[in-house]
Amino acid sequence: MQSLLPYLVEETYEVVDALQSGDVRDHVEELGDLLLQIVFQAELRHAEGAFGIDDVVSGIVAKLVRRHPHVFGEAQAKTSQAVLVNWAKLKAVEKAKKDARARSMEFRVARRLWCAPRALARRRRGGF
């Protein structure tokens, strides 16, 4: 899986480029390329017996429902500001539940440093 990281990052940057260019057809193509990376990784994990694309989609649905109780639940939010405040609270609870490694400074710095060379190369080629 680690060997796929550069491709995932590159496809993500290409989606950003397509959005910034305003080219709708390019955006469609690049979203497809990014989705291919996601489906491919899920299929590899499925072959390992870990999870499949259905689990990924179920996780997205669960997150949407959990983070939008004013739409899918009983919570009331009369203004967009109330929605944002509630969302921030829910997100903070989720973040607190993540493991210590993901919250550590070393992990966050390492993750950003890993992406930096690719971002710089992309910029030199005329990206962003």
Image (cartoon, helix red, strand yellow):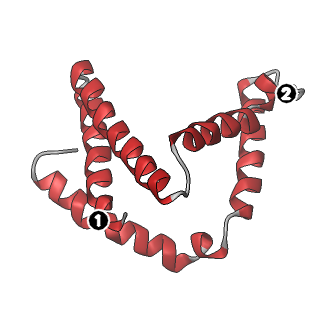
Residue type indicated by callout 2 = Gly
Q: On screen, 27 above or below 125?
A: above
Report, in whole angstroms, how far the alpha carbon at label 1 lies from the one at label 2: 41 Å
User: In front here: 56 or 52?
Assistant: 52
Q: Which residue has dot 2 on it?
A: 73
Amino acid type indicated by mark 1: Ser
Q: Position of residue 116 (x, y in %)?
A: 29, 65
Question: Is 24 left, or right, of 75 in this rendering?
Answer: left
Left or right of 100? Residue 20 is: left
Q: Secondary structure at mark 2?
A: loop
Task: Determine which quarter of the picture holds residue 61.
Answer: top right
Mark positioned earlier in the residue sequence (1 or 2): 1
Disc 1 versus disc 2: nearer the observer: 1
Residue drawn at x 25%, y 57% as measured from the top left:
119
Q: Which residue corresponds to the image point at 27% horizontal and 59% vertical from the top-left? A: 6
Residue lying furthest left in this view?
A: 125
Q: How many marks?
A: 2
Where in the figure is residue 117, as x and y percent of width and height? 23, 66
Residue at 71 percent across and 36 percent down: it is: 84
The residue carrying mark 1 is 3
Quarter of the image with the N terminus is: bottom left
| Relative image position of residue 17 (x, y in whole percent) | 24, 38
Say which mark, if any, is on residue 65: none
Q: Left or right: 22 with respect to 2?
A: left
